[in-house]
Image (cartoon, grey):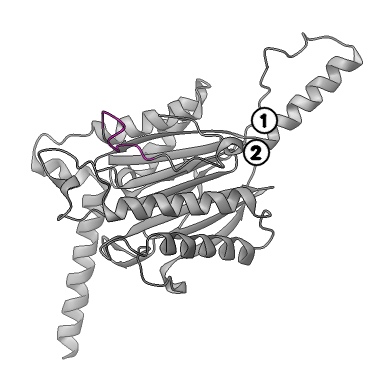
Amino acid sequence: MKMLRGASNNQRTPQTPGTPQQPHPTDKKVVQPPVLADEKHMHPTTPQPGTNKLTRMWRHIRRRRDDSFPRHGSASFVLHGEDAMAVGPRYLIVADGISTSTHPSNNPAGPSLSPSPSAVLARALVHAVEQVLLHDPPPVHLADFENMIVRAIISAQAHCRHVSPSMGSTLVVSFVQGKHLFTFSVGDSKCLVLRKARIAYETLAVMKEFNVPWTVTHHPLRSHMYVVQRIPLKKCDTVLTFSDGFGDNVYKDEVLQLVASAQATSVHPSDVCSRLVHHARAFVPADTTQESALPFAAAAAAAYVARVNEMNHDTKEV
C-alpha cells in the first residue's frame, strides 16, 4: 500500500500491485481520494494557538491549503498483476486488465515474470491518463475532460500497438476540479460519491451484456463504449473508486457502514481503503448455498431471470 502524490508523479510509472517486484500478489483494488473535509490539520511547524495577527494569518493559510488538497489514499489486492492504478490529490485512476486463460500469470504453479498483454495495456492507460491530468490545463467543460481522456487512451493504444491483440482493460478516471467531479468510465469499474451516509452518485457500468464489459483494446474507442459525467461536490463528500473485483463482493450499504465507521475514528483514507479490501476478502461461504449472499451472485441470478422472461416473451410472439 502506498500513497502517491500528484506533484511527484511526472517521471514514475503507474503503481501496479501484485507484479513480481512485490512478494505478495493480490485481486481487488480500491482507491479512495479525497475526503473533502472541513477539518483543521495541525502541522508540526504551525504556531501555537494565540491571538496575534501572524497566528491568525497562518491559520487562514493552513485552512485554505487543506481545502485545496483533499486527503487521499489507496489499498489493493491483486491476483494476477493485470491491474494498475494511480492516485493524486485531485485524481484517481483504475485500469482493470482482462485476464486471459492462456497467459502464464494464470498458471497455478505461480505468476509469470513477464506481464500479460492486458497488464501492459492497463499500465499504459494509467500512465497516459495521469500525464494528461498532470500537464494539461484543467477541464472546464465536460467535453474538455472527455477529449483529454480519449486522447490519453489513443496514446496508450499507440504505445501498445505491438502487444498481443488479446489485450483488454476497463478504465475509470475520477478528477476533482473546483467543486465538481469529472468521471470517465469504460466497462464495469466504478466510482461512488458518498455523502451523509448515502450514495449521492454512481458511475454507470458500460456493458455488452451481463459480466461482459466494454474494454479498451487495440480497436478504436467508440462513443458507445464509455460514459463521461460531471457532478457537483459538497464538503465532506467521499469519492471512492474501485474495480469490479471489489464491487462484486461488497454491497453498497456495507460500503456506507464501513466508511462511516472508519471515518468516525479519523483514520487515514488509506486505512479506510484497507478496511474495505479486508471486508471484501473476508467473506468465505461455508457452503454453496451461501453464495447468493455475494452481490455478483445476486446480480447473476437477476440477469438469468430477466433473460428467461425475455426468451419466454419471444416464444409467445412466435
Disc 1 is placed on an element classified as: loop
The spot of residue 105 in percent (x, y) is 19, 46
Choose top left, top right, bottom left or bottom right for residue 220: bottom left
Tell me the crowding category of disc 1: few under 14, some 14 to 19, or many 20 or more residues within 10 angstroms, Cα based. Answer: few
| Gap between marks 1 and 2 measured at Cα | 7 Å
Q: Is residue 181 above or below residue 28?
A: below
Residue 149 location, x and y as percent? 53, 60
Is residue 224 or residue 306 the one in the foreground? Answer: 224
Residue 127 drawn at (x, y percent):
47, 49
Q: Residue 24 has which mark?
A: none
Question: Do we see residue 73 in this rendering?
Answer: yes
Q: Evaluate whether residue 261 shows in this view.
A: no
The verdict on residue 144 being magenta is: no
Question: Could you say where residue 308 lies in the image, as x and y percent from the top left?
Answer: 17, 71
Q: Nearer the viewer, residue 52 or 135?
A: 135
- Label drawn at residue 235: 2
Would you say 45 lies left or right of 15 here? right
Q: Nearer the viewer, residue 289 or 36?
A: 36
Residue type for callout 2: Lys
Q: Which residue is mark 1?
A: 38
Report the side of 312 relative to 165 (left or right): left
Give the tally of numbered discs. Answer: 2
Q: Which residues are magenta?
A: 16-24
Q: Amino acid at mark 1?
A: Asp
Quadrant placement of the C terminus: bottom left
- Residue at 69% in and 59% down: 140
Who comes first in sequence, dot 1 or dot 2? 1
Residues tagged 1 and 2 counted as in contact (Cβ below 8 A): yes
Which quadrant is the N terminus positioned in?
Answer: top left
